[in-house]
Amino acid sequence: MDKKLALLSEYKEKTYIIVDFSHNKELWLEIDEYFNESICLYEKVSPELEQISPHLLQVNFENVAQQKWLKEKVLGKNMALFIQTNASMESFDEHFSNIAVIWNEESETHHAGKAYFAFYDPRVFDGFVRGLGRDTKAFFASVETFYIEDEFEEGLMHSYSYDDELKNIICKTVETNKGNASHIRIAIEEEQFGLDFGQEEYCVLTAWMRQNLKAHEERRQSKRMAYQIQKEFSTYFAKEEMPSLLSRVYDSTSHMKKYGFSQYKYLYTLATWEIFYGKGFEKNDPKGVLENICMGSKNETDKFTAFETRMLEFDRQEETQRSQ
């Protein structure tokens, strides 16, 4: 059995999984072959939409064919949330469906209206859980543990359990390949709430929840960037240095965003330069050109192009000095 599935199989009650079929609608056609029952989290949708919707399924660890399907078609694809509980499958239908469809309020980026919210996406779930506030207990309900795969480390899984006595979330990280585990406790902001059911037909994500989701996306972007830098410059950075590298990347991107940079491709290059040239390297330009570019009013693309041109001048100067 796959080591991740073996870890999940240690739980003696029921294990469910929410699978997001928007990643591969062809998989939806196969679920009846491997699962006895499935529940679509979107109510009253067309057959076309149902094929790419999230579905709740019950895992049977004694079904070898099902385990093979999960290993080959689902694991490692950022498309599954595992749920461990003693509750029935039907009891979660309404519970999760009430969050899978939300009401989007009017903003600069979108119009008001109904929207689908992928809280079950493992790339979103950590930020979602941290933003629940006093809704945390209600969301966990009878769930003992949620599990997600790590987006960047193949052997890692993260679990989330609610501690009613201490009023916090226990987040455990397990290295399934090595059997190692560590955990942290996430404090719950009791004065905040993440989901507003109010008078609307659908719940609304509060400003507190949106703030947490935004912060989570920034952390996720930095983590993706750090792993990319480590892979590209593996001779300089060992994997054991990832926590330090991640911190430096996060500081760098936060720093460069203040100058108006926002696109991943620009932030990645700027973070790489800052790691090799030192923190605040743009202020070390003897002629002050780099800092002037950063503080200027050009659009992001023109600003980066000018910045890159100046950095190439430095490279040519260094080559000239080495050749003399």
Image: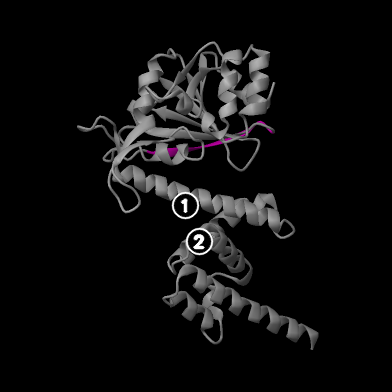
Q: Classify 57 as above or below 234.
A: above
Query: Nearest the camera: 281 or 30?
Result: 30
Where, by quadrant of the figure, is residue 33 drawn? top right
Region in magenta: 178-187
Question: Taking 63 as reference, is 107 left or right?
Answer: left
Question: Taking 10 as reference, is 239 left or right?
Answer: right
Find the residue positioned furthest to the right: 323
Q: Residue at x 48, y 66 (%)?
A: 256
Q: Classify 301 as above or below 51.
A: below
Q: Residue at x 27, y 47 (%)?
A: 106
Q: Residue at x 37, y 40 (%)?
A: 131
At which x and y percent is residue 257?
45, 64
Element assignment for label 1? helix
Query: Nearest the camera: 94 or 230?
Result: 94
At which x and y percent is residue 12?
54, 13
Where, by quadrant of the figure, is residue 25 drawn? top right
Disc 2 residue type?
A: Thr
Is residue 226 at least partly visible in the picture? yes
Disc 1 residue type?
A: Glu
Residue highlighted by disc 2? 253
Q: Quadrant of the N terminus?
A: top right
Element assignment for label 2? helix
Label 1 or label 2, whichever comes before in sequence order: 1
Q: Which mark is residue 33?
A: none
What secondary structure is the stretch in magenta mostly built from?
strand
Residue highlighted by disc 1? 218
Labels 1 and 2 touching (C-beta < 8 A): yes
At which x and y percent is residue 68?
68, 21
